[in-house]
Amino acid sequence: MPVALFSANHDRGSLHFDLINLYTGNRITTVTLDAETGQEVGRRDLVKGCEYRKNSYVLLTEQDFDDARLESSATIKIDKFVGTVSVDPIYFDASYYVVPDGDAGDDIYAVLRDSIAAREKMALARVVIGRANAPSASFRWSTDLSPTPCTSTAT
């Protein structure tokens, strides 16, 4: 069944602030310095590293991240159905709306949604959103073809 996900959280009204020098009115920029030498380091000379022992790092390149990146897909794999109260909301990380993707999916979506809602169930599923793998997501289905709340969980 083709579906689309839309973020339920919108950042449209948020204000974003820059740091400004009180005396000159100029915006502040960030300078990267080597922690040991105090020398400035250019952006092209920076890599990401993960400390595995004090002062010992595994260095990662952009190619390493590209190689590990999961392909985003339009597929939601439902693992099982559980009662709507069986997943504690403390585990919810981000909310999305699930909608049929195109007219072809409306009928299938409606049958699945009505069946799940009548049994007071939610779907535990796997989905890749952007670069992140949401290993489990719980989907609560609405009673019409309006967007359905879907909450990604971290576990």
Image (spheres, rainbow, N blue to C red):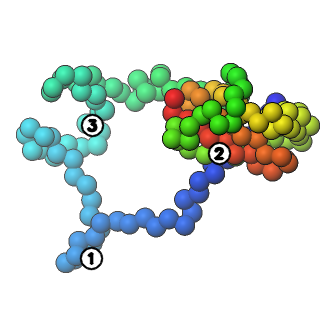
Q: In terms of secondary structure, where does tag 1 sit? A: loop
Q: Mark 1 points at which residue?
A: 25
* Residue 75 x/y as whole percent: 71, 28
Please state which amino acid type lies under the numbered disc 2.
Answer: Tyr
Circles 3 and 2: CB atoms closer than 8 Å: no
Please state which amino acid type lies under the numbered disc 3.
Answer: Leu
Q: Can residue 72 be seen in this view?
A: no
Q: In this view, does 65 lie to the left or right of 71?
A: left
Which residue is at a point 74% across and 33% down the rendered structure image? 121
* Residue 86 x/y as whole percent: 63, 32
Q: Is residue 83 visible?
A: yes
Say the numbered circle drawn on residue 96. Answer: 2
Circles 2 and 1: CB atoms closer than 8 Å: no
Label 1 neighbour load within 10 Å: few <14, some 14-19, many 20+: few
Label 2 neighbour load within 10 Å: few <14, some 14-19, many 20+: some
Q: In this view, does 76 lie to the left or right of 94?
A: right
Residues at marks 3 and 2, CA–CA distance in whole angstroms: 35 Å
Q: Name the residue under label 3.
A: 46
- Residue 18 falls in image quadrant: bottom left
